[in-house]
Structure formats: structure tokens, C-alpha cells
Image: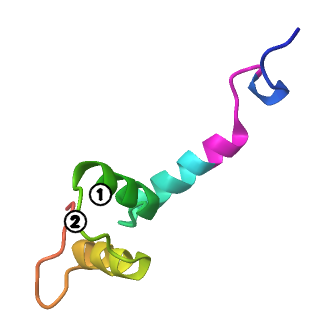
């Protein structure tokens, strides 16, 4: 009896790997994970309003590139 699906036989789950690579690439260019944000707010900040997906995107863009003369994050 085999308890593990075939794709996990060697510890390789390609869909999970692709998801992690996509999330990593988004974080490198300043785009956070909206679903992770929603889960965090619901768990840690009970009662705080949750930004819409569009507002979250704008907030991440503003944090990355600056808005209204605010200094943007720069690594170098």
C-alpha cells in the first residue's frame, strides 16, 4: 500500500514549487501576497478593515516607488 501520491515520491511537488517561485518573484519587485495579507489582518488585527485588492496593490506600489514626494525604498 502506497500512502503518498506519485508526484511526492521523490519529495517534488511541481505546483507548490511554481507557486513559491511566483510568490518570490512578486516579493522581489515589491508586490506582496494579497491573500497572505488578508489572513494576517484577520488573525492579528481583529476588527481592522481589510483593504480591497486594488487598494492593497496601490499601497504596495506606493511603498515601493514612493508617492506624493515620499521617499521610496531603495536597496542601493
Q: Is residue 42 left or right of residue 22?
A: left
- Magenta region: 9-18
Would you name the residue on which mark 1 appears?
Answer: 41
Q: Is residue 33 left or right of residue 49?
A: right
Outermost bottom residue: 68
Q: Residues within 10 Å of mark 1 (few under 14, many from 20)?
A: some
**Which residue: 20% across, 80% down?**
66
In the structure shown, which secondary structural element does the residue marked by tag 2 occupy? loop
x and y percentages locating residue 62 in the rendered image: 25, 79
- Closer to the chain start, of discs 1 and 2, is 1
1 or 24: nearer the viewer: 1
Q: Quadrant of residue 63?
A: bottom left
76 or 55: nearer the viewer: 55
x and y percentages locating residue 3 in the rendered image: 79, 15
**Which residue: 19% across, 62% down?**
76
Q: Is residue 20 left or right of residue 26?
A: right
In the structure shown, which secondary structural element does the residue marked by tag 1 occupy? helix
Q: Residues within 10 Å of mark 2 (few under 14, many from 20)?
A: few
Would you name the residue on which mark 2 appears?
Answer: 48
The answer to whether 70 is drawn above or below residue 31 in the figure is below
Outermost top residue: 1
Asked if residue 10 lies in the magenta stretch, the reply is yes
**Which residue: 42% across, 64% down?**
34
Q: In the picture, which quadrant includes the N terminus?
A: top right
x and y percentages locating residue 75 in the rendered image: 21, 60
x and y percentages locating residue 46 in the rendered image: 24, 56
The answer to whether 44 is drawn above or below residue 60 in the figure is above
**Which residue: 64% across, 48% down?**
18
Asked if residue 27 lies in the magenta stretch, the reply is no
Q: Quadrant of residue 17?
A: top right
Q: Are marks 1 and 2 in contact (CB under 8 Å)?
A: yes
Amino acid at each position: 500500500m502506497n500512502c503518498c501520491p506519485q508526484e511526492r515520491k521523490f519529495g517534488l511537488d511541481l505546483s507548490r514549487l511554481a507557486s513559491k517561485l511566483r510568490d518570490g518573484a512578486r516579493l522581489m519587485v515589491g508586490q506582496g501576497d494579497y491573500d497572505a495579507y488578508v489572513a494576517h489582518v484577520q488573525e492579528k488585527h481583529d476588527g481592522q478593515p481589510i483593504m480591497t485588492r486594488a487598494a492593497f496593490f496601490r499601497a504596495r506600489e506606493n511603498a515601493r516607488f514612493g508617492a506624493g514626494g515620499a521617499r521610496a525604498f531603495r536597496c542601493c
